[in-house]
Image (tube, rainbow, N blue to C red):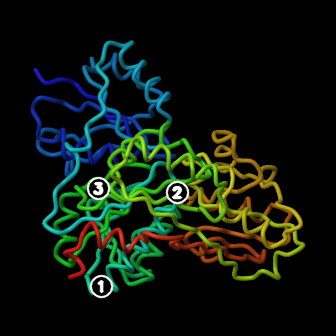
């Protein structure tokens, strides 16, 4: 008899693990997924078009809080944990729920879930959400394009809509973002790349995505999400570290796995982080990833209207996942407000509307800053209402996309940009040339 399995996930890694490890495997019968982190993703089905012939009715998706009841209801033998950026201790709390109910608890090894490509793969991953993967991915793609290579980026999944329709998605123009009804979170990852002329793939079935990406590329850049490990087997594994959160590389799953697998370790934000944070990460790398090449990087900020915020009451909006999943209480926007002389960062919490109020309740470490969460049209409107109801002189937003094009507000909006910059030797290009010399000769 096959083992009954529940896969714990958050609409991404869980589907990939099913596709490459469980689908078609008669040893297992996946009876349910659970969903966490992302709002409104439970209550769906993983569709039969993707689940395969062993699952003609698809697979139901339940809230994670129902895990113990699901184990009892379906007589579950195995719980497979399959999402990212969660404290080690919380992983074991979930393991304890499973084992107390009589089920085994499983973390699938990275080698079982990484697909081998015909093309060279450079993976950009991190030890926490918000370390600077996106700007580093842009830098890597730029280096490869300068070398005359056709580059395609494949982004970690964010399938929050119709899963069957989102199996393979290709983005190359702004119109593609509109046509696919992309959330703010999706736009933040896709828009900066396509604005540089880089084709982006994402979706649900990453073997099919790989085959499509291989057709139009010399090199594929895996653009990771959260602190997850790559879905594709990398020829060069780049891992980002944040010295503002030094030590987190040892405390979060699967960020520590990434650290231990790193071939290139990029310590980012050295221009704003305390030196002792950089030192602590170097020491951990020396102990746990001694063969990794260490690259120091800055994340300089660029303000598009310095005079508009000096002496003003400012509402700061930061990248949503950095504050929520990533556990940060501030980002580039707060740094810019302080650097360029804002009189006050206005507290957005009293004006929080609907689901934004729920975000503050769930992530209590976030104080005055407004996270740019927008998982669907309703939440975008809640974000918009929060902005409009906050008593401020100007809105300062530090998101990878132009929020002014998404939110309807009469308030003046000023954008903070940030990008990757090498902070010494070896540079990122030098490490890529060292590790993958065939790409440059």
Residue 204 disc label: 3
Circles 2, 1 touching at the beta carbon (< 8 Å): no
What separation in Å lies between label 2 and label 1 (alpha carbons)? 26 Å
- Where does the image place residue 376, in percent across and percent down from the top left? 52, 58
Q: Residue at x 19, y 46 (%)?
A: 20
Q: Nearer the viewer, mark 2 or mark 1?
A: 1
Number of the label disc, if any, that sits on residue 131: 2
Q: Nearer the viewer, mark 1 or mark 3?
A: 1
Horizontal placement of 163 versus 321: left or right? left
Query: In 3D space, how far apart are the residues under numbered discs 3 and 2 (Cα atoms)?
Result: 24 Å
Q: Secondary structure at mark 2?
A: loop
Nearest the eye: 316 or 235: 235
Name which of mark 3 and mark 2 comes first in the sequence.
Answer: 2
In the image, residue 130 sits, relative to residue 110, either above or below, namely: below
Residue 43 in view of the camera: no
Circle nearer the N terminus (1, 3) = 1
Q: Residue at x 58, y 68 (%)?
A: 299
- Label 1 – label 3 distance at C-alpha: 31 Å
Tell which tag, 3 or 2, sits nearer the viewer: 2
Residue positioned 32% across, 70% down in the render? 432
Residue 291 image point, x, y percent: 33, 51
**416 to 228, vertically: above or below:** below
Q: Earlier in the sequence, mark 2 or mark 1?
A: 2
Quadrant placement of the C terminus: bottom left
Horizontal arrangement in the rendering, residue 234 relative to residue 371 (left or right): left
Residue 147 - label = 1
Residue 231 shown left or right of residue 10 in the figure: left
Mark number for residue 97? Answer: none
Give percent across and percent down for residue 339: 78, 69
* Horizontal relation, residue 105 to residue 383: left or right: left
Q: Nearer the viewer, residue 44 or 411?
A: 411
């Amino acid at each position: 008899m096959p083992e009954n399995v529940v896969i714990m996930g958050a609409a991404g890694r869980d589907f990939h693990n099913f596709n490459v490890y469980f689908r078609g495997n008669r040893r297992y019968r996946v009876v349910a997924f659970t969903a966490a982190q992302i709002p409104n993703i439970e209550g769906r089905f993983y569709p039969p078009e993707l689940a395969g012939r062993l699952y003609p009715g698809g697979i139901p998706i339940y809230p994670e809080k129902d895990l113990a009841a699901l184990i009892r209801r379906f007589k579950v033998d195995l719980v497979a944990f399959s999402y990212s950026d969660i404290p080690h201790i919380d992983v074991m709390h979930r393991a304890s729920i499973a084992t107390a109910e009589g089920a085994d608890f499983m973390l699938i090894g990275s080698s079982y879930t990484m697909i081998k490509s015909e093309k060279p793969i450079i993976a950009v991953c991190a030890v926490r959400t918000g370390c600077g993967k996106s700007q580093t991915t842009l830098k890597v793609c730029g280096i490869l394009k300068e070398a005359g290579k056709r580059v395609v980026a494949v982004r970690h999944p964010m399938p929050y809509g119709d899963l069957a329709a989102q199996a393979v998605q290709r983005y190359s123009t702004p119109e593609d973002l509109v046509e696919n009804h992309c959330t703010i979170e999706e736009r933040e990852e896709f828009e900066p790349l396509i604005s540089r002329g880089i084709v982006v793939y994402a979706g649900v079935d990453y073997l099919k995505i790989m085959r499509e990406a291989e057709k139009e590329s010399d090199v594929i850049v895996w653009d990771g999400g959260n602190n997850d490990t790559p879905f594709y087997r990398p020829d060069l594994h780049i891992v980002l570290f944040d010295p503002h959160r030094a030590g987190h590389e040892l405390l979060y799953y699967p960020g520590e796995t990434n650290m231990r697998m790193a071939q290139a370790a990029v310590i980012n934000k050295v221009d704003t982080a305390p030196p002792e944070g950089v030192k602590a990460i170097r020491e951990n790398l020396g102990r746990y990833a001694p063969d990794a090449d260490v690259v120091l990087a800055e994340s300089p900020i660029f303000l598009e209207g310095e005079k508009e915020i000096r002496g003003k009451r400012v509402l700061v909006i930061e990248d949503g996942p950095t504050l929520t999943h990533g556990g940060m209480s501030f980002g580039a926007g707060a740094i810019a407000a302080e650097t360029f002389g804002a009189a006050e960062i206005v507290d957005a919490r009293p004006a929080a509307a609907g689901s934004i109020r729920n975000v503050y309740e769930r992530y209590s470490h976030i104080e005055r800053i407004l996270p740019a969460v927008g998982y669907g049209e309703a939440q975008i409107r809640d974000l918009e209402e929060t902005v409009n109801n906050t008593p401020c002189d100007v809105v300062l937003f530090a998101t990878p996309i132009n929020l002014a094009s998404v939110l309807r507000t009469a308030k003046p909006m000023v954008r903070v940009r940030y990008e990757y910059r090498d902070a010494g030797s070896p540079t990122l290009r030098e490490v890529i040339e060292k590790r993958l010399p065939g790409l440059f000769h």
